[in-house]
């Protein structure tokens, strides 16, 4: 059914479940990293090379991400029944032009490639006897630039332009459908939720730009942002020629613990989403607001 919205307000309050992260030194220039978040565990080495005298830092982090077998016990079991995994390669180069006195200028360039496999089950006839299994591979690519500029004096404004290019080709399971079961011996009819359609994929290409602004004083920062999403046709790796949407946001972030911990922030924004090509289940123009709470991000980090 086509959904019609005249006003929409989205609250993005995440579940208050803090990520469990650990980093430990293995060898000079090599750290081990692990994190558990949202039922997923990611682990791998992190290689760092630094030349402080030239303001250069290089980071390379290969890792693998797997779903926990038992979230309550943080338990991971890998065997022939493992149906989902993702390999990740992240790289980042930072050039800091800041001198002992004067303005602050820093440029960071990053990229990340992901490749993974997911096993799906579906029941085209609406019963367990018709079970079908299908394994699909997904792949993503992201390129990012983050700059940071300030006069360097006390109370000076801080600016952080951020640009991101993302391509995603991720397979997802179809939605569940209510299936009426045959009446049991007592004549009771029940309904089961089952996936009857095979998995699907639509490639996405998404450039985005944001300008983070901190006036130098107070507990608020500001961030206008623009996104332009290209979504391809089903079962195609080409993201162009089907559906395009332009999205505008203007975030205001509040840092309740700025003096002690600037990694916690609360943000609100109005948004405007305009369909410029194709058709989807939304109106050609959608608008509303969003609220978010972020933990564990660096100051002025956005994209």
Image (tube, rainbow, N blue to C red):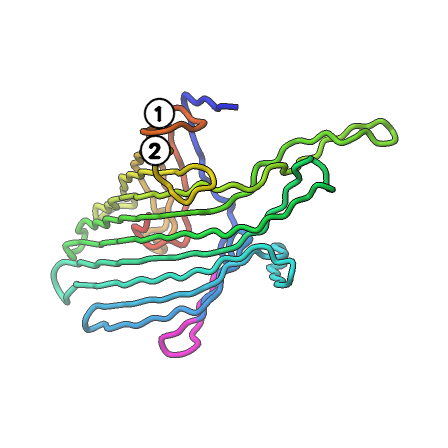
Q: Nearer the viewer, mark 2 or mark 1?
A: 2
Q: In percent of the image, x 28 and y 38: which residue is there? A: 226
Q: Which residues are magenta?
A: 21-31
Q: Nearer the viewer, residue 2 or 36?
A: 2
Q: In percent of the image, x 69 and y 31: which residue is there? A: 179
Q: Residue 219: horizontal and vertical position, in percent?
A: 30, 45
The secondary element bearing badge 2 is classed as strand
Mark 2 crowd level (few <14, some 14–19, many ≥20, 10 Å Cα)? many
Q: Residue 202: horizontal and vertical position, in percent?
A: 44, 40
Q: In percent of the image, x 44 and y 68: which residue is there? A: 23
| Magenta-drawn stretch contains 23 | yes
Tell me: 227 left or right of 74.
left
Q: In percent of the image, x 17 and y 63: which residue is there? A: 98
Q: Nearer the viewer, residue 10 or 172?
A: 172
**Disc on the earlier residue, 2 or 1:** 2
* Residue at numbered disc 1: 285
Q: Residue furthest right?
A: 185
Mark 1 crowd level (few <14, some 14–19, many ≥20, 10 Å Cα)? some
Q: Residue 206: horizontal and vertical position, in percent?
A: 34, 43
Mark 2 and mark 1 in contact? Answer it, CB < 8 Å. Answer: no
The secondary element bearing badge 1 is classed as strand
Mark identifier at residue 70: none
Q: Main secondary structure of the magenta part?
A: strand
| Magenta-drawn stretch contains 18 | no
For the image, the number of numbered tags is 2
| Mark 2 → mark 1, Cα distance in angstroms | 9 Å
* Residue at numbered disc 2: 245
- Which quarter of the picture shows residue 224? top left
Is residue 38 depicted above or below 187 in this figure? below
């Amino acid at each position: 059914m086509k959904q019609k919205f005249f006003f929409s307000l989205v609250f993005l309050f995440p579940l208050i479940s803090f990520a469990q992260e650990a980093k430990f030194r293995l060898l000079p220039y090599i750290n081990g990293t692990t994190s558990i978040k949202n039922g997923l565990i990611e682990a791998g080495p992190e290689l760092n090379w630094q030349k402080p005298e030239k303001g250069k830092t290089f980071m390379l982090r290969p890792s693998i991400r797997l779903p926990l077998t038992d979230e309550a016990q943080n338990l991971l079991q890998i065997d022939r029944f493992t149906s989902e995994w993702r390999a990740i390669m992240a790289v980042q180069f930072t050039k800091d032009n800041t001198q002992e006195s004067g303005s602050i200028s820093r440029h960071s360039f990053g990229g990340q490639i992901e490749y993974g496999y997911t096993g799906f089950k579906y029941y085209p006839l609406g019963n367990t006897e018709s079970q079908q299994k299908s394994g699909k591979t997904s792949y993503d690519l992201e390129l990012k630039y983050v700059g940071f500029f300030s006069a360097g004096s006390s109370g000076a404004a801080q600016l952080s332009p951020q640009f991101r290019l993302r391509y995603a080709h991720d397979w997802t399971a179809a939605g569940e459908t209510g299936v009426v079961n045959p009446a049991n011996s007592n004549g009771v009819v029940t309904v089961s939720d089952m996936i009857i359609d095979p998995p699907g994929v639509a490639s996405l290409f998404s450039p985005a730009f944001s300008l983070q602004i901190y006036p130098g004083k107070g507990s608020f920062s500001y961030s206008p942002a623009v996104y332009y999403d290209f979504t391809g046709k089903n079962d195609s790796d080409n993201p162009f020629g089907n559906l395009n949407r332009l999205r505008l946001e203007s975030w205001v972030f509040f840092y309740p613990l700025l003096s002690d911990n600037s990694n916690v922030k609360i943000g609100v924004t109005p948004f405007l989403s305009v369909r410029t090509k194709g058709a989807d289940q939304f109106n050609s123009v959608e608008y509303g607001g969003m609220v978010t709470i972020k933990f564990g991000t660096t100051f002025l980090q956005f994209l």
